[in-house]
Amino acid sequence: MDVSSTEMQVCVPEDRDGDNNRCFGTFTEDLYLIVEWLKPCGIETVAMESTGVYWVQLYMVLEESGFDVLLVNAKAIKNIGEKKTDQVDAEWIMLLHSYGLLKASFQPDNHAHRIRNLSLHRDNLMKSASREVLHIQKSMELMDIKLTNVISDILEKSGQAIISSIIAGERDACQKAYQNVNRTRKNTESNQKTCIMRNFVI
């Protein structure tokens, strides 16, 4: 199988079907049409090129339908001899696979794949949250609001209450801060100056 963003080119041996090199779409129903065609052809094992992320859904559909799927690195199936077209590439992959010349790349099962994606997504969200905290701190510094001087973590309940009150239009930052902050580094009159907004800009 030759995989791309807009179409799936699928080739089976000539003795399995008269029209043995077919082009399919990439929508979900198209992926199941591929399955419906391969099964009557007696196909049990399939080789496909790992192009970008376009192979993922087809791989999962084929595996769930009972096929033995080999995901192959594109460099291992490069066709040097002929002009590159989707039909030629699909036939070349089919020939290499039929002779047992392709080595499958490691691919976890679908359940492990979903857990891996969820874990990566959570990790990305955590990193994104850390970046947003830095953006908040930078914005407050630009407004000359020294909230980090009196609060250890601006994302704690007290810190979020202060930020929310500022966004809501509160301008007396000192009063609001010391109404909400129970744990400060130094709860002194001089430290209250750190909350005064000299240039309030949103």
Image (cartoon, grey):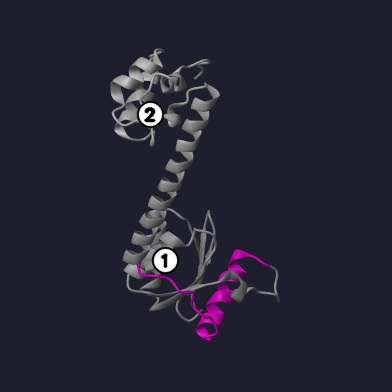
Residue 196: percent from the left, percent from the top? 46, 17
Q: Residue at 40% of width from left, 68% of height from top?
A: 37
Q: Can residue 43 be seen in this view?
A: no
Contact flag, marks 2 and 1 (Cβ < 8 Å): no
Q: Label 2, secondary structure: give it.
A: loop
Residue 83: quarter of image: bottom right
Label 1's element?
A: helix
The magenta region covers 84-109
Q: Is residue 152 visible?
A: yes
Mark 2 Cα shell of 10 Å, populated few (<14), some (14-19), many (≥20): few
Taking the spot 55% from the left edge, 84% from the top edge, the residue there is 101
Q: In the rendered image, which residue does mark 2 sit on?
A: 186
User: Residue at label 1?
Assistant: 59
Residue 178 is situated, as x and y percent measured from the top left of the image, at: 33, 21
Q: What residue type is labelled 1?
A: Tyr
Crowding around mark 1 (Cα neighbors within 10 Å: few <14, some 14 to 19, many 20+) is many
Q: Which mark identifies residue 97?
A: none
Residue at horizontal 39 percent and vertical 17 percent from the top: 174
**What whole-number distance in Å separates the C-alpha atoms at marks 2 and 1?**
60 Å
Q: Earlier in the sequence, mark 2 or mark 1?
A: 1
**Horizontal and vertical percent for residue 155?**
36, 35
Locate residue 134 relative to residue 112 in the image: left or right: right
Quadrant of res 92: bottom right
> 133 or 99, which is in the foreground?
133
Residue 106 magenta-highlighted: yes
76 vs 17, nearest the viewer:
76
Amino acid tagged 2: Lys
The mark closer to the camera, 2 or 1, is 2
Looking at the picture, how far across and down is residue 139, in whole percent? 51, 27
